[in-house]
Image (cartoon, helix red, strand yellow):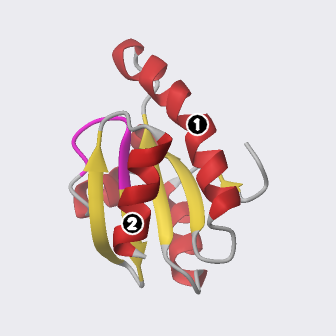
Amino acid sequence: MTNRVQRPHEEAEFEFILARADVPVLAYFYGVWPKAAAACKEMDALVREAADVYQGRLIAVRADIARCPGPVRRYGVTGAPSFVLIDRGEARAAGGGPMSMTALQEFLDAHL
């Protein structure tokens, strides 16, 4: 992933990114179990592209569901892949399941 997509290794890092963000955060929650892994792998490229397209307007964060249980509960994440647009700690919008780039851009354009 590009440098514009942050990859916290633990929940504390995720929380640190949220606390320091001066723009909304696109949190992309992924899973590594077999049914989720394939769909999540496909979404990785889209998240990188979104980070490039929306550079300066958002921070993209790729977070492992298993390593960030607090945010998963707080933002109502129920599966992977899931997206939550977070602004100042509050969820602006959420979406689950694989998306096309067009759908991801529509999601972001509607809520940024």
Residue at the extreme right: 3
Depth order, front residue of 109/47: 109
Q: Position of residue 81 (x, y in %)?
A: 38, 37
Depth order, front residue of 52/7: 52
Query: Which residue lies under the disc numbered 1?
Result: 44
**Callout 1: few (<14), some (14-19), or many (20+) C-alpha neighbours within 10 Å?**
some
The boundaries of the magenta stretch are: 77-83
Q: Is 52 covered by the magenta stretch?
A: no
Residue at the image position 28 percent from the left and 51 percent from the top: 95
Q: Amino acid at mark 2?
A: Leu
Q: Amino acid at mark 1?
A: Asp
Query: Which residue lies under the disc numbered 2?
Result: 85
Upstream in the sequence, badge 1 or badge 2? 1
Residue at the image position 62 percent from the left and 36 percent from the top: 45
Q: Position of residue 8 (x, y in %)?
A: 61, 53
In terms of secondary structure, what is the magenta stretch mainly?
Answer: loop
Q: Is 81 covered by the magenta stretch?
A: yes
